Every structure is written in C-alpha cells, then in structure tokens.
Image (spheres, coloured by chain):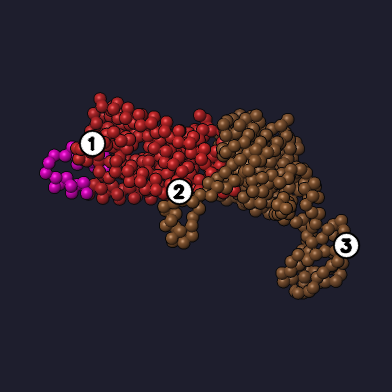
Chain colours: A brown, B red
Amino acid sequence: MTQIVVQDLVKTFRVAERRSGFLGALRGLVKRRHRVIRALDGVSFTVERGELLGYIGPNGAGKSTTVKILGGILVPDSGKCEVLGRVPWKERIETVRRIGVVFGQRTQLWWDLPVIESFELLRDIYGVGAREYSSAVEELVTLLDLTPILDTPVRQLSLGQRMRCDLAASLLHAPRILYLDEPTIGLDAVSKLAVRDFILRLNRERGVTVILTTHDMDDIEALTNRVIVINEGKILSDGTLAALRATVTKERWLTIDLVEEGAEVSDEDATVMSRDGGRVVLSFDPDRVAPAALIGRLAARFPVRDLFVENPPIEEIIARIYGRACK
Amino acid sequence: MKAYRAIVSARFRMMLQYRAAAAAGLGTQLFWGFIRIMIFTAFYRFAKAPQPMTLEQVVSYVWLGQAMFAMLPWSVEPDLRVMIRSGNVAYELLRPVDLYWLWFSRSVARRSAPTLLRAVPMFIIAGLFFGLRAPQSVGVAAAWLAAMAGAFVLSCAISTILSISLLWTVSGEGVMVLMSGAAWLLSGMIIPLPLFPDWAQGILAFLPFRGVADAPYRVYMGNIPLNEVWVVLAHQLAWIAAFVVVGRALVGRGLRRLAVQGG
C-alpha cells in the first residue's frame, strides 16, 4: 500500500542579502536585494507501507524541507504531495494525527516538566484513550529502558536519555509513519546502538513506516534498505544501499596512528590520502586487497599505535555522485 | 477542548514553580505602588479644581493595578520567541491542534499563574495596611469578578496577536516596546484614565486597553455604577471577538509564508 506520494515538489525561499560594509548596509536600507533559494527543485518519490527509507544528503540539501512539507508545516510552491491519502498542508491536523516526528537537534518534551508529565500532556493533545496510552507507555518504557528517568525533569537528562524519551514521545499516539531527522546526532556509541535497535524493531514488529534523515552512514547501513540521495533540491539516486555504493565506489579508508612521526608509509595496493603528524589515511579497494592482509603488511613494516577501517563518509559518496552528475 | 485544557494546566503548574520570581515581583510592585501613590497624593494636595476621582479611589485603583500587573498584555510569550528563533516552533505545528487556540492557551497559562501568585498576597497586604478598600457590596464584588474575567480573556486575546506577529518579525522586540508603551498608558496603569483630559476620554473609551485594567478597577470601587457594568462587559466582548477573528486570519496567513528556521 502506498502511503506517501510526492510529485515534482518545488519549494523556494527568498533570502534578503546583506551587502557587506557600512556603505553596503546603507544601500540595503534603500533597496533590498533578494536571492531565491530553491530548497526543493522537482522532487518525486513514493513510499510503501512498512518501508525503512534513508533520506540523505549534505547540509542544506532539502531533507528537512521535505520532511516539513510532509508534516504539513511548510507549504510548497508547486507539486503534489499526499500522506496517507491527505494533502498535509491542507489537512494539517488530520495528517499530523497519524504521523510522528523526531528532530534530533530539538526536543518536543517540556523542558521543566518530568518526562512522564510530557507524555501525559501529549496523550491529552492527541486524545489517546486511557487504555491505549497505558499499554503504549508500558511497551515504550520497557523497550527504551526509561523506568529510571521517567520522573526526571527533561533539562536534567543526558542527550542519549533525552533522545530515547523523544522517540517514545513521538510514538505514544501510535503513528503509522515516523519521520526521524538525525535521531543519532551527538549520541555516544551505546545510545546510538540502542536507538538503532529500537527503530529496527519498531519497523519490523509494528510495521511502522520510517523515513530517516541522517549524516551517519552507519545509521543508513544498519537500518535502511532503500536510500534516496538528495542534493541542492534534486534527487540524485534512489535505490538500495549496496547498489548506491557499488555505483559510486567500493573503496574503504584505513587510518593509522604511527608510533614514529614522519615514517614514509606506502603500499602498492593503497593510496595515501593524507598525512598529518603520526596519522596517515589510506584508501584501498577491498576487492583488490583484503583489509586484514593490508593491515598485516603495514603493521609488519611500521610500528603502529592504533588503526581503524571505515567506509568513506556520506559526504564523500554524495560528493562523488554529485561530481558525476555534473560531468 | 481537552487538549487545550491540558496545555493550560501543565504550563500553569510550571509557572507556579517560579515562586522566587513571584516574591521578587511582589516586592517590586509594592515599591512602585508606593511611589505612584506618593505622586498622586502630592498632586491631589495642590489640585485646585475638584477631580473626577477621590484620592481614596485613586489609591485603591493603584493597588488593584499593582496586584493585577502580571495579567496585562504587555509581553510577547517568551517561550514562543525562543521557539521561533530556534525553529522549535516546528513541533508546535506538528500537533493535531489549532495553532491559534494553542497559542491562546499558552497565553492563558502565562497570565493566570503569576497573577494568582502575586494578586492574593498583594490584596492582603494592601488591604490591611495601605488603603485598598473592599468592594461596597457583594453585587459590586460579583460585577468586578465578571469584569476581571473579561479583562483576562481580552488580555490573552491581545497578547496572542502579539505572539502571532512573531511569524513576521521573528524577534518581537519592536512590537513589545510599542505594545507595552501603549498598554501601560492607555489601560490606566500610569495615570487612572478618568484623570486624562476630556478630549481624550472618547478615544480611551473606544480603545480596547481600558477593558484590561481601568474598567474593572472602576467597577470594583463603584466609580462605574452597577447598572452600567454591562457596557464594560459588552466593550470587552466586542474587542475579544475582534481580536480572535483577526488573530485567526493572521495565523492562516503567517503559516503560508513561514520559513521554519534551521535544519
């Protein structure tokens, strides 16, 4: 069942430009210069029920703008959009009743109130029945391990605790679609895993459709099977993560911290990308050389203090996709 | 309806936590009350012509104003200013509630809790020691309560419009300066409105600000007779209706041009 239909969505913002300097400021008094930013420039996609979709792109790509339009907060300039059969900005109240949203950088909990009171307030705002509410709270509290912090005022929570509470808060009214905007931003490793695990279970066990925007490639890898890449308001690719990676690059990065600074690290199967004091970053193709073999060879030749292997960051992938799109 | 009630009650409880602020506010308002009364005493001692209010009435008027100070529509909701600056207002729009009434509810909570915390001790102190007279009859007291309720709703409707103006101005600084000046002067918080020159009376009677302070205070002290109280209530109701209608139209327009900051 198709839950979200987006067709040729366009949204522009007018930004007043300030000229620099005193004279520029004076001229700005007389005549304002405006620049039009196309935050979304003809975006189209559909989302089926139960999908776990990654929506990625660099800062300012239009991710949050899309989410805000889907949530009925912003009105697009043109294009079609339906969420659960409704046009969000025309039937805002009815649409938001069935969706949940978490903005990772902000909290929807009341700062001065204990967590549980925020939950009760949301219960009344969404008009959740007493029985549904208590079973939802019970389930969420167990899944997210909230028992010890329910009576703590939100301002005293750590970021990880707050994020778990925010997730619970967005699900009290049993939404059919959940938008997560950078839900793991700033979290430590343990909290990240807890949040990811929860999102997966939510999607698998309850069939909640999840749209996830993030800069964390590991989030994408752990959670999603479909990824939409957007940059400068245009969709650059839409498909599985493996397909995306394969089309762009298979390369991985190896970072080594050397005991001696300045050693000339090199290997025939890897390219040195950067040297900074004792830290060297190499890129290699795992099909050409197994990571273990490469590490073994390097460690045998140079005294290594520490090392790790990672995928090229999301920005790198996007940059390459975008670079190709330009050619 | 339940949603709005829950919002008011939660915010009301939150505001009740700020007891130190209430105590400090009480001290400040007592101090200003004394200064205003001293000025009026000096003014009355040297006044040659008979005045439209007795000094005794002016004293009660001043104390009522000091007691109900926190209710006046002179501020933009500070939480909303922060939200609109930071973009957190997005969450407000994600709730299945009407934005106008949501912000109106915020205003109700913001005005009710501090007023209650300050007015009760102020009535006791000023009534026992500083010349605030009790109403002349139960009927007057009841009429005053009705006018006060009208003043409260009117004040919330005005301040909700101020909050909505944030959708255009973002900072709200200018609106606040303009509005607090107008509200203070035109509601009688600086000089009781009956003491204004005759040519100004027509305008003052028409403007909404009289309804949030001057009118209920004069009902309290019997300066407005009981059989004219309905004029006060009708004036308040008319303005409430006007502010609600305009406010709702503005919310609709403001949202269409909204660019949520950040993210």
> Disc 3 marks which residue?
A293
- What is the chain identity of the residue bearing mark 1? B
Name which residue type carries label 3: Ala
Which mark, by number, is residue A245?
none
Q: Quadrant of the N terminus of chain A?
A: top right
Residue with the most extreme front position: A327
Can you give x and y, in whole percent of width and height, for residue B70 in the image? Answer: 37, 43
| Range of residues picked out in magenta | B39-64
Circles 2 and 1, Cβ within 8 Å, touching? The answer is no
| Rendered image quadrant of residue A233 | top right
- What is the chain identity of the residue bearing mark 3? A
Residue B147 in the figure: left or right of residue A195: left
- For image coordinates 53% across by 49% down, the residue present is A35
> Disc 1 marks which residue?
B201
- Do circles 3 and 1 both sit on a common chain? no
Residue B239 in the figure: left or right of residue A13: left
Residue B214 in the figure: left or right of residue A146: left
Q: Is mark 2 on a helix, strand or loop?
A: loop
- For image coordinates 28% across by 47% down, the residue present is B33
Can you give x and y, in whole percent of width and height, for residue B230 in the image? Answer: 29, 26
Residue B260 in the figure: left or right of residue A57: left
Q: In this view, does A220 lie above or below A267?
A: above
Q: In this view, does A213 lie above or below A173?
A: below
> Disc 2 marks which residue?
B171
